Each structure stands twice: as structure tokens, then as C-alpha cells.
Image (cartoon, grey):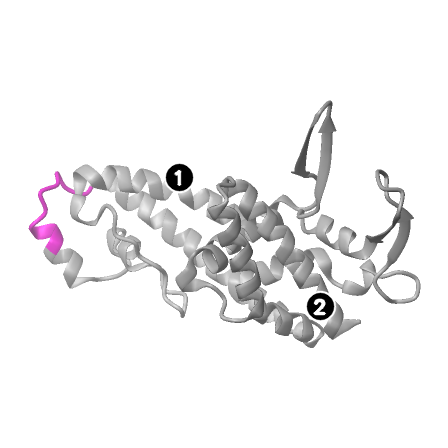
Amino acid sequence: MRLAHLNRVQSPIINRLRQDLAWQFPEIAHIKSRKGVDGDVPLLWGWLCGERSSKRYDNLRDRSIGLGITSTVRHHARRLCDLQREEHSIEVELQELLGDSKFTAYREVFKTFGFGVRLEGIILSQIYPISAYFGADGKPEVRIRKGRKSGKPTKRYLSLRRFQKSLGLAPSLEASGDKSKIKIVGGSDLCRIAFWQWVFTRIEVKRCRIDNEIGAALGAQLDAEKAAGRGVRLVRSRISAKAAKLLFRELVKVLE
């Protein structure tokens, strides 16, 4: 949650900086600069506030058609650098926490889904230990009930349902008159958003798609639903819910 908060705080600052740079130093207004692996602040923001040097940006500034960098821009760049350092320190702390041996089996499963460290931390905060979702016999709880419409015996996967709901990915049917729709209700909003972002970056973008059975299965469903003309929001929601089902299945295999 602290990382999500820092991300929300940074976004408007970055937007304001880019708007100001569009007339002060347009040549760098849309450059994407990332922090270093070792935690160094992004070169662009570090250079703007005087923390890092760059001959490239020096040369661009000397030939710029802009009106010149103001102290306000340098101040905002310094704020961004401070936020980036705080973000890095939290990520290091998270890495240390995830290094605990009790999470090893979980993280092995997470690797097959291509989850990043942040998403791993978010998921673990919601579902650890997986045994909390099992029945009294220590196994996933499944009950057989009569179907509401068919009247036939139907399996209800209660443990899976509870697992999906804790992740904010349990779809529920809402009916009104002759109309019905699937809606996600309850669970972690932060986790649901993180899953949506994962679907976009690791499943929807084909060149980044996970190269295994999980990536193939989710990717095939996503491609088919988009080709059928379904809305992107609905498709991402359904793929996220399907991913949660697969995640539960794989965790049960390893940890039951």
C-alpha cells in the first residue's frame, strides 16, 4: 500500500513537470527515464535538480528552443528524487521480507505467472497462508448442492471462491428484471488493479506474453474474447479471474 501511495503521489508531479518542460525545455519533455537497478534516481529528474550529471542533457539544454528551466521545475524534480529513493528503500525491504523461507514455495509458483516483486507482495498479503482457505480436513472445500435453475447436483468450489474474493477477483451475477450482468464485488481493490495491470503487461501484449502453458491458455482466451468484440475492461476482468483460478490450482498442487 505504501508503494501504491507513492506511485499516486508521483503521477501528478510528473504530469506537471512534463507540461512545464514542454515550453521550458521541449527536447526532454517526453523522455522516459527510469531509476537504476542499484537505486540511483532517474537520470532526467536527477539532472534537473542537480543531483546527477549528463553531457547529453547539457548539450540539449545549450541548443534548446525552450525558454529556460525555472526553479519550480527543479524543485519538483527534487521532490520526485526523494520519492523515488523512498520507493527504492521500500522495495529493498519487501525483497528482504519475501526472502523468508516460508514464502519459497509460493514464489516458485508466482514465477510461472511472471509476477513482479510488488505483485508477489500484494498477493501474499491477501492469501498467506493458503491453508486458511481449506476445509476442516485440510483440503480445498467442495460442496454439492442442487442448481437453482436445473435442480441437478452442482459442485460449489468454496475454497476457490473465497480465494478469488480475497484477491478482489470473484465475479458475482446481478439480475434485474430480464437483464443480468457479471460484477466484481468485494475483496482487495489494490490487488484487483494490480492483476489488471499484470494482464495488460504480461498477457495482452503478445511480445511480452509468458512463454508457458499458463501464458498460452490466458492469451488464447484473451485474444478470442477481443476478437469477438467484447469490451477491453470486461476482457481484462475475466482474464484476471481466470488467472486467480489457475493460481489457486497451482498453489494447491504445491502446498496442499
In this picture, residue 115 sits left or right of residue 11: right
In front here: 116 or 170? 170
Q: Residue at x 47, y 47 (%)?
A: 227
Q: Position of residue 151 (x, y in %)?
A: 89, 42
Left or right of 57 on screen, residue 216: right
Q: Which of the image's four quarters has the C terminus?
A: bottom right
Q: Position of residue 67 (x, y in %)?
A: 12, 38
Q: Residue at x 12, y 54 (%)?
A: 60
At horizontal 69% and vertical 68% (from top left) the residue drawn is 250
Image height of 198 relative to 72, above or below: below
Q: Secondary structure at mark 1?
A: helix
Q: Is residue 27 left or right of residue 90?
A: left
Residue 66, image x and y in percent? 12, 41
Sequence-first disc among 2 and 1: 1
**Is the residue marked by circle 1 packed among few (<14), some (14-19), or many (20+) residues within 10 Å?**
few
Circle nearer the viewer, 2 or 1? 2
Label 2: which residue? 251
* Helix, strand or loop at mark 2: helix
